[in-house]
Amino acid sequence: MKKYYLHNGQARIGPFDMADLKEHQVTESTPVWFDGQQEWIPAGQVGELQPLFEVPTAKNAAMAEEALHDKNIIGRRLISILNVIILVLAAACIFLLWQQQNRKNAEAHLKEAQEEEKARVRASISSYVTASHSEYNYSATSGISGLDITVLNSTAYLLDNVRVAINYLTANGKIWKTVYLDFNNMQPFSRMALAAPNSDSGVSVQHKIVSVTSTALGLP
């Protein structure tokens, strides 16, 4: 590829190819020299450099203007599309945040309702957890036998332990002895029966729930 030198009035600069010359604002009177040339000549006299001085025709100008117009339209469309995408993303983020907050509020309300329900049950635990005894056998010689104690869990919570005290009473109503039955791991809405130990003394019995333990209910 041919290389050209330019003279700026003080010194020679170059070499340049055609692409370089376009960036140096070469005019028809700019002195140029290239290999094989005896002396400096105006650039306008070099046939290969004529494309540098061509004035765009009206058609070319119109095409350039049309191309610029199309670029502007495309640019505006791209901006519009980007704006729509940004708005959609912003709306999606707002919706997700709103949904997350609603879920947190719902969970908080549910937890609060559950704690209120637990407090209500704890306050009336004696109404929800009850005990009863079966008919039993009494003999003046052998005492009391065949006694069963049944505990009913009417709550919706697991009861870790229900302790029942059984008092064996003498004829004058005094307590001869007390034994305890432990009802463990009572499922919600369930009943459990245990056999009480036989007693060689006593004419009657009394029973009473003395403690209820439930981690689920918050009863230590």
Image (cartoon, helix red, strand yellow):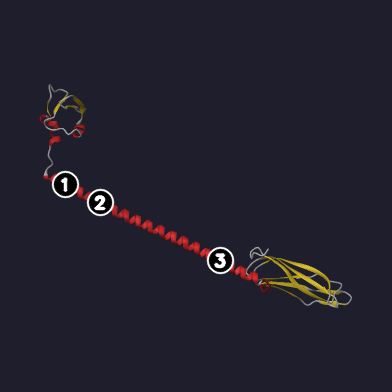
Amino acid type for the residue under numbered disc 3: Glu
Residue visible at 29% across and 55% down in the picture: 80
Badge 3 marks a residue whose secondary structure is helix
Which of the labelled discs sits on residue 74, or is there none? 2
Mark 1 vs mark 2: which is more N-terminal?
Answer: 1
Tell us which disc is closer to us: 3 or 1.
3
Mark pair 1, 2: CA separation = 16 Å
Give the image location of residue 87, x and y in percent: 35, 57
Amino acid type for the residue under numbered disc 1: Met
Mark 3 vs mark 1: which is more N-terminal?
Answer: 1
Whether residue 112 is situated above or below residue 61 in the rendered picture: below
107 with respect to 5 (left or right): right
Q: Quadrant of the N terminus?
A: top left
**Residues at badges 3 and 1 in contact (C-beta under 8 Å)?**
no
199 with respect to 162 (left or right): right
Dividing the picture into quarters, in which one does residue 158 lie?
bottom right
Dividing the picture into quarters, in which one does residue 136 lie?
bottom right
Give the image location of residue 60, x and y in percent: 14, 44
Residue at the spot of label 1: 63
Which of the labelled discs sits on residue 112, or is there none? 3
**Residues at badges 3 and 2 in contact (C-beta under 8 Å)?**
no
Amino acid type for the residue under numbered disc 2: Ile
Whether residue 155 is situated above or below residue 50 in the rendered picture: below
